[in-house]
Image (tube, rainbow, N blue to C red):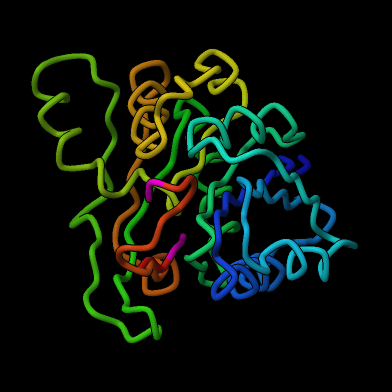
Amino acid sequence: MSRPFVSVLIDTYNHEKFIEQAIVSVLEQDFAAADYEILVVDDGSTDGSSEIIKKFAQRVTHLPKKNGGQGSAFNYGIPRCRGEIVAFLDADDWWEPNKLSTVVAEFESHPESGAIGHGLYEVDEYGKRLFLNVPDQVYSCHLRDLAEARQFLELRSFLGTSRLAVRKSVMDKILPLPEAMLIEADEFLATHAVALSGCRALEPDPCVPSRTRLGSPCAGPASTICAAST
C-alpha cells in the first residue's frame, strides 16, 4: 500500500533569522521527496524572508499574502495543500529528521485518529536546549466525556505548531478559521480536530521531539516535530 502524501505547511512573519533552518529541516527528512510537498505562507513579512524562501523554489511553494495573522495564514495555506495529511511547522522552529516518518506511521497504524501530536525541546534563540517537554505515555483522546476533556487540558501543549499534524479531510470540516485570531489559531484548529476525530500524543522518542524557540511571533504583527521551539 502506498504511503499517504503529506503537505508541510510553514507559516512565517518576519522570521528572516530562522526560516532557512526550518525549511532545511523539512528537506532533510528521512522521507521520500516524492511523498511530500512544502508550502510556506508568508504573512506579509517586511524583512528578507521572501528572498530566503525563493532560494528553495524547486522544492518549496511560496505563498505570499497581505499580513493578517495566524488564522488568516492557515485559511490561505490549508486549502492549497494537496496532501492527505498536513503537518504544521512555524518558521522559527525546526524538525528532527524522523519527524514525518514517525507521524505518518502513526496515522497509518491508527486510521481512526484525525490528529497526531508529540513532545518538543524548548531552546533559546541560539538553539541551546533548555528542557524537554514530552508525554509520559501514548495518549488517545476524543473529547467524548468529562474525563477525556480533563485529559485534553494536559495534552494541548503537544498539539500546537510545530508538533501538530491533521488529516486534510478533518480540516475541511473546520475551515475557515476565525480571521480575528491573530494568534493561537493552532489551538482552535487542534481542539476542533480532536472533537471531530480524536488525537494521539506520542510517547517520548529522542528523535521525535523538536526544538522550539521561545517568544518569537509565528504570524502577524501581534506575535502569535517533531519540533524545536523558541
> Looking at the rendering, in which quadrant would you find the N terminus?
top right
Apparent side of residue 111 relative to residue 222 in the rendered image (left or right):
right
Give the vertical position of 45 relative to 2 (above or below): below
Q: Residue at x 37, y 39 (%)?
A: 183
Q: Which residue occupies the extreme right position in the image? A: 58
Report x, y in % for residue 160.
37, 45
Q: Nearer the viewer, residue 108 or 21?
A: 21
Q: Nearer the viewer, residue 178 or 127?
A: 178
Rendering quarter of residue 45:
bottom right
Rendering quarter of residue 205:
bottom left
Membership of 226 in magenta stretch? yes
Total number of numbered discs in the rendering: 0
Q: Residue at x 35, y 43 (%)?
A: 159
Report x, y in % for residue 71.
49, 31
Q: Residue at x 72, y 36 (%)?
A: 83
Q: Which residues are magenta?
A: 222-227
